[in-house]
Amino acid sequence: VSEVVKTNNPNYKVGDLVYGSIGWEEYSYIKPDVSALPFILVNKELLKDTPLSYHASFLKLGGLTSYASLIDIGKPKEGETIYISTAAGLTGQLVGQIAKIKGLRVVGSTGSDEK
C-alpha cells in the first residue's frame, strides 16, 4: 500500500492510496510508460484510523480478491442486499465487512453450525 506524494499521471492525484507492484522503500519512482503493472486505487474509508503498514497483508490475495470482486465486478449500491455463500472463509468475511461499510444489507451462509 502506497500513498501518492507527487504525480504527473492524470489517473492519480496526491493523497491517493494505491496497491501494486512497488518496492519495499520509502519512495518509488514509477515510469509513466509502465502500463503492464496497473495500480489499484484503495478506498481510504477502509483504511481509516490505522497506519498504512497494517494493511499490507489485508490487501494481498484475500483482501484484493474480496475488494475487487465486490467493488469492481459487483458494483454494489448502498441499500442493496448481498448474499455471501461460505461467509466464514477469508474472502467471505472480508466481502461482508466491506459490504457493510458500503451500506449494504449482508446475508451470509456457512457449511455448518460450528462455523
Image (cartoon, rainbow, N blue to C red):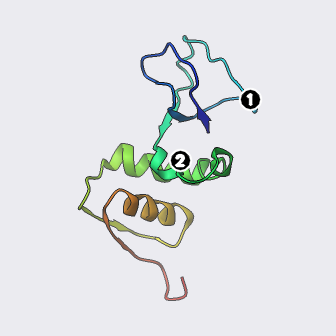
**Residue 11, above or below 61:** above
- Badge 2 local density, few (<14 within 10 Å), some, or many (20+)? some
- Residue 17: % across, % down: 53, 36
**Residue 2, above or below 112:** above
Residue at horizontal 43%, vertical 58%?
98
Q: Quadrant of residue 20?
A: top right
Query: SS at mark 1?
Result: loop
Marks 1, 2: nearer the viewer: 1
Residue at horizontal 75%, vertical 33%?
24
Q: Which residue is mark 1?
A: 26
Compared across the picture, whether 108 is left or right of 9 comes to left
Circles 1, 2 touching at the beta carbon (< 8 Å) = no
Query: SS at mark 2?
Result: helix
Give the amino acid at mark 2: Leu
- Residue 77: % across, % down: 25, 53
- Residue 10: % across, % down: 42, 17
Residue at horizontal 46%, vertical 24%?
12
Looking at marks 1 and 2 on the same chain, the residue that comes earlier in the sequence is marked by 1
Of residues 97 and 62, the one nearer the viewer is: 97
Q: Which residue is mark 2?
A: 64
- Residue 29: % across, % down: 66, 17
Query: Which residue reaches farthest right?
Result: 25
Of residues 59 and 109, the one nearer the viewer is: 59
